[in-house]
Amino acid sequence: MTGCRGIVALLGLAISACENDGLSSAQASQGAAARSIEVSDNRRTAITAAVERVSPAVVTVQTEIVERVPADFYEQFFGGRSGRRPSSGLGSGFIVSADGVIVTNAHVIAGATRIFVALRDGTTYPARLLGADETNDLAVIKIDARDLPVAPLGNSSNLLVGEWAIAIGSPYGFLLENTEPSVTAGVVSGTGRNLPAESAGAGVYVDMIQTDASINPGNSGGPLVNASGEVIGVNSSIFSPSGGSIGLGFAIPINRAQRVTEDLLAHGVVRRPWVGFKLQSPQRGARRTALAKGVAISSVVPGSPAARAGIQPGDVLVQSRDRVVKNPFDWEAERLELRVGEAVPLTIERLGREIRTNVKVADLPEVNAPKVTVLREIQLVTLTPAIRAERNVRRATGALVQAVTARIAGQLGIQSGDVILQINRVPIADAEAAARALDYYGGRGAIVMYLERQGQVYTTEFVIQ
């Protein structure tokens, strides 16, 4: 009996040992799992949280453009006519309303005959254009869908230089064989940047957010996001001699994009703010002083909001609302933020004395001449190396205003000797391109023209009947 009890005792010890071994293994497994979760949590950052919050609302915008192509020699021989050739384009956008309203860049959908939108899960919808604003390079499109994820919008007026900036989009579209949006991270490198040189998207941008987050082909129209997962800008362009990102990316501030979107949804067009004065262009070689002083007002339109507010030619504009005006680009940036009907407090200097006045913003009036007359009263010549040397023009290409009638000069804000660099989003290479652009945009809404005068770039805006 004693021997049997000993055997039973030994068996009990063995079973107990096995149970303990099993418990230890389970505990070890749970510990490993806990450590795995702990590592996973450690990998989560403000950037990953921001991406999770916004990326479901990021879409790919596909366009189809039908181009007319001339018939080749053999087709012409047998009586053939010019044909059509479809081409495709790609960009990004983000959803701002659960019923399918999407914001993207105007240059992404420019000239498109058909537009398609692919969601993150690959579902594709046909889209229709609700409105486009080429001046701000923004467009609003819509798909017929419901209960879509919406990108949270932030505030671009209080950005901090150095804070995180995350660019989300679809670089190179479906070449990566994946509808999941791509993400690049950097910081806000600067705010209120003016880009008068040519960039990958178009030629001139005003009051932009600069970031070193890579913005590559296909990212145009996608959101620039802060660390809180809020959209602070619309990715628009890169500044690069090679076409690839070199750390100079630019985004349209979201506050401006919201104003444009609201106008396009309500009216189908953007109401252009107008106060009725023109600024004096800086003198050649005055770049340093232009950064430290206000801008002189060269003329005031009789009966305009500025005239009714008591503003006079020779006054120096130094501030509008909270924005200090140091150069014409500062005023151009401020004007993009104004709304028709609001009263804007302006600060001017007159004979060494500061004067504060309120100007009620009105709609931009039309030039009281049809576009055929406008085109007939402007003589343009293509900028050549000889003309550049003679007139000391900084730009290599453009259209020189050789002559213009006094009536059209006053209404359009141009003068003989100006070099037209860009009309809306179209860079101007020669006189023919300028004439085509004026002919195309005449009667289609506001026209923003970028000019070089006395070595400086400035803008003028008008509407041709």
Image (cartoon, helix red, strand yellow):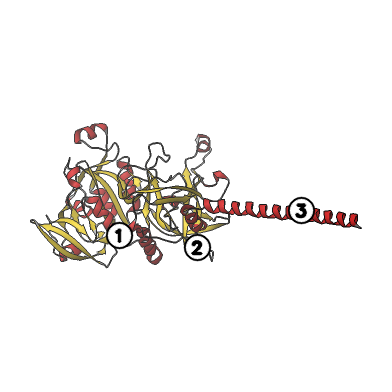
Residue pictured at 19% horizontal, 36% vertical: 391
> Which residue appears at 53% of the width and 66% of the height?
147
Q: Position of residue 29 (x, y in %)?
A: 67, 52
Mark identifier at residue 241: none
As drawn, is 417 to the left or to the right of 396? Answer: left
Percent from the top left, x then y, of residue 78?
Answer: 53, 38
* Real-space Cα separation, disc 2 to disc 1, in angstroms: 26 Å
Q: Looking at the image, which residue sits at the far right?
A: 1
Q: Is residue 31 above or below residue 401?
A: below
Provide residue 131's location: percent of width, then percent of height.
41, 59
Which residue in the protein does label 3 denote?
17
The residue carrying mark 2 is 100
Give the Cα distance between marks 1 and 3: 77 Å
How many residues crowd mark 2 within 10 Å: few (<14), some (14–19), many (20+)? many
Residue at (59, 54) in percent of width and height: 37
Sequence-earlier tag: 2 or 3: 3
Q: What element carries label 1?
A: helix
Residue pointed to by mark 1: 337
